[in-house]
């Protein structure tokens, strides 16, 4: 931690700030104040995705959970990634050789300064003793923001946007992302990994966005 970050931490300690609303408060075990905690919805199940051998998430994407993700991605509150990653619970029967965060294009990383999925995956890996490998999958296309795109538009935008390394051949891979909406990103990642010889691909996300209608997702 550099001196400026240490100074900010001293003035506004992250461990007493609600992960969703950012207000200082007495926090519950999920890192939220009582008001935000009441608004959380736990994930139960989701429709299967082509090429994904199993999926899990922590929360339903709503006002509270989206606030946590958006503060991490757009407000630079990187400390939020650790509790989000630690909250991911993996089924015991999943065999995982390597964890792969959904990659961002190098331009997006330069713009944002970090890949939020990588920070989440790193925290999850520490809890499970798993190995993260960011070299197994890269994003080759600088696709536009997927927010508010329809499912069909996302498919067109992300087609062949990822390339996997031959080093993933025979491996069981876990993809980690912040939010699953249409599932197109996870499907395209899985397609690239399996094309390169990956044995199986599981996926975990912090949030699952329930469709609002045929073309709209809760963004």
Image (cartoon, rainbow, N blue to C red):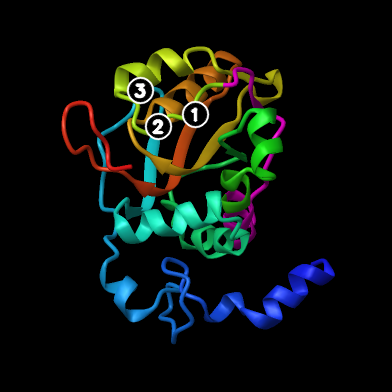
Residues at badges 3 and 2 in contact (C-beta under 8 Å)?
A: no
Q: Secondary structure at mark 3?
A: loop
Q: Nearer the viewer, mark 3 or mark 2?
A: 3
Inter-mark Cα distance, 2 to 1: 6 Å
Neighbor class of circle 1 (other Cα within 10 Å; few <14, some 14-19, many 20+) is many
Vertical position of residue 14 compared to residue 136: above or below: below
Residue 58: name its quadrant. bottom left
Badge 2 is on which residue? 53
Closer to the camera in the image, 43 or 71:
71
- Residue 200's mark? 1
Percent x, y for residue 67?
A: 40, 58
Range of residues picked out in magenta: 121-142
Percent x, y for residue 177?
A: 49, 42
Residue at the extreme left: 213
Inter-mark Cα distance, 3 to 1: 12 Å
Residues at badges 2 and 1 in contact (C-beta under 8 Å)?
A: yes
Vertical position of residue 42 compared to residue 172: above or below: below
Badge 3 is on which residue? 50
Q: Secondary structure at mark 2?
A: loop
Name the residue located 33 percent from the left edge and 30 percent from the top edge: 182
Task: Tell me which numbered mark, 3 or 1, is placed earlier along the sequence.
Answer: 3
Asked if residue 7 is among those painted magenta in the image, a careful observer would answer no
Percent x, y for residue 142?
A: 59, 21
Percent x, y for residue 97?
A: 61, 39
Q: Secondary structure at mark 1?
A: strand
Closer to the camera in the image, 48 or 109:
109
Inter-mark Cα distance, 3 to 2: 8 Å
Asked if residue 127 is among those painted magenta in the image, a careful observer would answer yes
Task: Tell me which numbered mark, 2 or 1, is placed earlier along the sequence.
Answer: 2
Q: Quadrant of the C terminus?
A: top left
Q: Quadrant of the N terminus?
A: bottom right
């Amino acid at each position: 931690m550099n001196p400026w970050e240490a100074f900010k931490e001293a003035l506004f300690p992250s461990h007493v700030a609600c992960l969703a609303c950012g207000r200082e408060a007495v926090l519950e075990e999920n890192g939220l104040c009582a008001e935000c905690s009441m608004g959380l919805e736990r994930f139960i199940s989701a429709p299967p995705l082509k090429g994904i051998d199993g999926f899990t998430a922590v929360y339903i994407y709503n006002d509270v959970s989206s606030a946590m993700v958006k503060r991490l991605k757009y407000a630079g509150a990187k400390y939020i990634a650790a509790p989000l990653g630690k909250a991911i619970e993996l089924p015991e029967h999943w065999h995982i050789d390597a964890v792969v965060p959904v990659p961002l294009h190098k331009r997006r990383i330069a713009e944002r300064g970090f890949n939020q999925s990588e920070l989440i995956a790193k925290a999850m890996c520490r809890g499970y003793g798993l190995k993260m490998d960011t070299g197994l999958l890269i994003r080759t296309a600088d696709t536009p923001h997927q927010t508010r795109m329809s499912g069909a538009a996302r498919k067109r935008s992300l087609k062949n946007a990822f390339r996997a390394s031959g080093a993933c051949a025979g491996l069981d891979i876990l993809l980690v992302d912040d939010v699953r909406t249409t599932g197109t990103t996870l499907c395209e990642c899985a397609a690239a990994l399996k094309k390169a010889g990956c044995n199986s691909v599981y996926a975990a996300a912090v949030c699952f966005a329930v469709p609002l209608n045929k073309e709209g997702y809760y963004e």
